[in-house]
Image (cartoon, coloured by chain):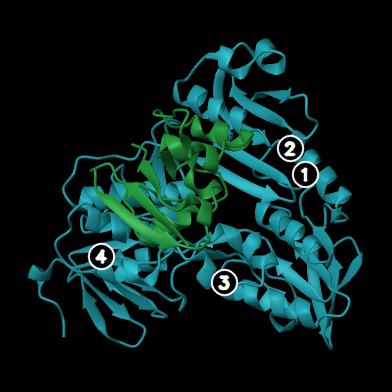
Amino acid sequence: MMDSPDDKVVCVVGASHAGVTCAFALRREGWPGRIILFDADPELPYHRPPLSKAFLTSELGVEHYLLKPRESYLKDAIELRLGVQVANVQSTERYLTLADGRRQYYEKLVLATGARPCLPPIKGMADAKNVFPLRTAQDITRIREALLVSRQKRVLIIGGGYIGLETAASLRKMGAEVNILEREERILHRVTCPFMSEFFRYTHQNHGVIIETGKQVVAVESSDAQSTLQCSDGSSYQADVIIMGTGVRVNTALGSSAGVEIENGIKVDPTARTSDEHIYSIGDCTFHFNPHYRRYVRLESVQNAIDQAKVAAAAMCGKNVYYDAIPWFWSDQYDIKLQIAGLSQGFDNLVVRKEDREDQFSVWYFKGQELLAVDAVNNAKAYVMGTRLIRDRAIINKEKLADPAVALKSLV
Amino acid sequence: MARITYITNTDESITLEAFSGSLMELAVQNGVPGIDGDCGGVCSCATCHVHVAPEYMAIVGEPEEIEMDMLELNDDVDEYSRLGCQVQISEALDGITLTVAR
């Protein structure tokens, strides 16, 4: 049975941080009708950041990392359709078609479809054994199982980004031999400055991780449970488990089927609305305007997922809101806590501030005199002050900033 | 077991019982308004800020450096502020009242 247009149904496709936050925020904002949350993943929605960290190293099930307990969905009358794939959107008549052919009418549609692992075309990869991406709880369960039965526990991580590095730290804790192959000339090439790359390379090597850069994997071959990887420079590596940390592709297929504007993701306005007035989009899949940086960005982050979800929910309930946030991120590796405030892209000079403790410092990214971002290592003070100074567009005395004897607070 | 009372921003009083876990987890599991726990409990987002009833502050204890710094993200931080994710529930907390920060 189709709902009638009077039923005020919101369909949210994608039940991760963005989709779940949006569903609950809709109820809190007073949405009067049905709220239906779809996801192809059969698990009750869970936190994704712990997947490469605490979840991988623990023996606990994903039920310990839930975003909300089951009762919360019942209490707020949020209908969960888990393990259900949405096939396409018919935006003129406003209904979704599910993979099994059923249809669901919507008054408003929220596309929180996120991203999927990008698996570069490598010869033999499709047939290779024990190759895992790292995006879902099931991916982690499979990695854990593969490690458990592997005698030598030789893990090869392809890609030295944050996911790859967090996974390496976790796997070392679990007693695996870990080798990272990075295509660029340094790890974290896309997301941070050479100073930070070097810090993480040093840290991982001290923990026994072998990092090799400039390595393009071109072919894989498996025999029994073991794989051999060939690189373009002629080198080769043996591994029992291969983890693909090679970035993501945005899930825009549903957006395309709805006919909404796509540009480096699903393009949304400051209320998280797409080019179709009945369709909103939130989280990793959106290409959205950041007012502070005065440009369109696409972010893979919990912060953006949550902030856009709340804005979209309020906007759908008729409130006058718009998205205006300073992005923030974090990464935990070994006993290192990295906290990032802002977006460093476009920086042309930087200040490194080293505190008295050797493992405590911060990197401040500037474009001219404008502070763009701060990478704070074991240094929440720098993260918090950085957030404030970025938000206030403060002009900072860089000499004082570089001097650990000068308190950060006095820079305000 | 500990009985823990949260006072929300609308002055609603919610009393919950728990044996373990953090003050943030208990609040999120029971939908206490104003406690979000966005980062999942790793002291990265400061969305689980509570004010501890003064008479319980000695039992709960002072925040560590990183938590103290993260609390600075909030405007209404005071000497009774804690991040719920950094406080583990034990019987010692039985009867405690926490006011959810604004």
Left/right of residue A234 with respect to residue A111 in the rendered view: right
Q: Residue at x 44, y 68 (%)?
A: A45
User: Which label's residue is closer to the chain start, 2 or 3?
Assistant: 3
Q: Provide the chain ID for the residue under circle 2.
A: A
Q: Quadrant of residue A34?
A: bottom left
Residue A307: give x, y in percent of width and height.
38, 46
Residue A196 numbered mark, or none: 2
* Mark 2 Cα shell of 10 Å, populated few (<14), some (14-19), many (≥20): some
Q: Earlier in the sequence, mark 1 or mark 4?
A: 4
Residue A280: give x, y in percent of width and height.
Answer: 29, 56
The numbered mark at residue A200 is 1
Chain A pictured colour: cyan
Is residue A300 something one can see in this rendering?
Answer: no
**Chain shown in green:** B
Asked whether the residues under marks 1 and 2 belong to the same chain, the reply is yes
The residue depicted at 30 percent of the width and 54 percent of the height is B14
Q: Is residue A203 left or right of residue A303?
A: right
Are both tags, 3 and 1, on one chain? yes
Q: Amino acid at mark 4?
A: Asp
Chain under label 1?
A
Query: Residue A289: x and y, percent?
Result: 39, 40
Mark 2 vs mark 3, CA separation in Å: 29 Å
Classify A328 as above or below A165. above
